[in-house]
Image (cartoon, helix red, strand yellow):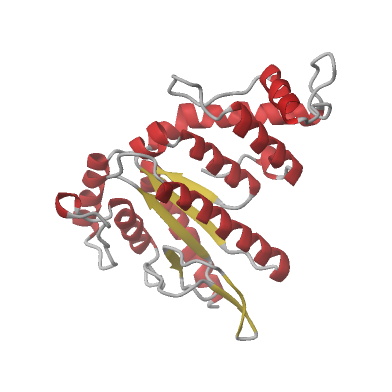
Amino acid sequence: MKADGRFLSQPKEFWANARTISQEVGYTERGKDSIKIPSLESVREEFSRLGLSTAHIADSDNTLTGFGQCLFDYFTFRAAILNEIVRHHFMKKDSAHVEFKRLKKLLKPKCPLPMNKQKAEKKNYAFLTGIVNILIEANIGKAPCNYDPRSLTTVTHNAMPLRTLSRRVDGAFPSVINPIAIWETKEYYYTTTFGSRVADGVYETLLDGMELEELEAAAQRKVQHILFIDDYFTWWECGRSYLCRMIDMLHMGYVDEIVFGREVLTRLPELAVEWKAAYEASQQ
C-alpha cells in the first residue's frame, strides 16, 4: 500500500494534531472489531481536558475549518482502509506456511531462507521473510541483493560514508552501501499477545524513516523504504492501534510502502522488477 496523495503533503502540525486526537480519543472502538473515527464532540472534550484549543479545527458553531475537515477526512480514510482492505490481507500462520511451501517448490530458490526465532515445536522457517527473499530472487535476474545484511546501511559521497543508519535492516538491494531499496519484515505468527517486542518494531521503523528523511534532505539521495508485515492475530486482533500508527507513518513519508500479508504475493514482484530496472540503468 502506498500513501494517498491527499494526505502525503500535510505539514507536521497536522500529524501532531492527528496523533494527539487518536491517542486521547482512542484508535479503536471499545468492544468492536474496528478502527474508530473520532467525533468532533469527543475531540473538543479531550482537548478541553488537556487545556488545548480547538479553534483551528472548528468554529463555535461546529463548522470545520479547512484544517479540521482534512483531519476528519484522514480519520475516515484511515478507518476505511484498515477495516475494509488491510485486515483482509493478513494471513494466519498456516496460510503463510502454505504459500511459503508453494513458492519454495515452484521457484527452487538459492537465496537464504532463515528460520524463525522460536523453539521446540514452533521452530520453523520464517515464512514471510522466506516469501520475500524468494520473490525478490525470482524477479531481479542476475542483479546482486543482500538478503541478510550484517552491516549498517550507508550512503556515500566521494567514496566516503556520508550517512549511516542506526540499525541493521532486514534486506537491501543491491547492497547496504548506496542501496536502491531497503526493507524490514515484521512477522509474528507464533505470538500470543501484542508484546513490547512488536511495539518496538513499529518505533524502529519510525527511527529508520526519520533518518532516511534527513538523508534525503541533506544529500538529495532517495532510498526506497519498504515494510512487510503479517499475522492476523498479532496485527488485527491485538495491534489495531499500531496499524493506525503505521498508516500515519506511511503518510508522514517515513516509509514508502507497507505491504500487508498476502499482498506480498502480487506487489513484491512488481517492486523487484522496478529495482532491477533502476540497478541496470545505474550500471550503464
Q: Indicate the quadrant containing the C terminus: top left, top right, bottom left or bottom right.
A: bottom right
List x then y, in percent, for residue 55.
Answer: 84, 26
The front one of 193 and 170 is 193
Q: Given the current orientation, which residue lies at the most extreme left position?
A: 121
Direction from residue 100 to residue 15 in the image, left or right: right
Direction from residue 245 to residue 122 in the image, left or right: left
The quarter of the displayed image where residue 16 is located = top right
Direction from residue 278 to residue 49 in the image, left or right: right
The quarter of the displayed image where residue 43 is located = top right
Q: Given the current orientation, which residue lies at the most extreme top position?
A: 61
Q: Is residue 49 above or below residue 223?
A: above
Q: Is residue 109 above or below residue 271?
A: below
The front one of 92 and 268 is 92
State how many labels appear. Answer: 0
Q: Residue at x 38, y 31 (%)?
A: 237
The front one of 121 and 5 is 121
List x then y, in percent, for residue 160.
Answer: 61, 85
Q: Residue at x 37, y 44 (%)?
A: 230
Direction from residue 271 to residue 127 in the image, left or right: left
Q: Given the current orientation, which residue lies at the most extreme bottom position?
A: 159
List x then y, in percent, for residue 75.
Answer: 62, 29
List x then y, in percent, for residue 98.
Answer: 21, 44
Q: Residue at x 49, y 63 (%)?
A: 182
Q: Residue at x 40, y 65 (%)?
A: 140
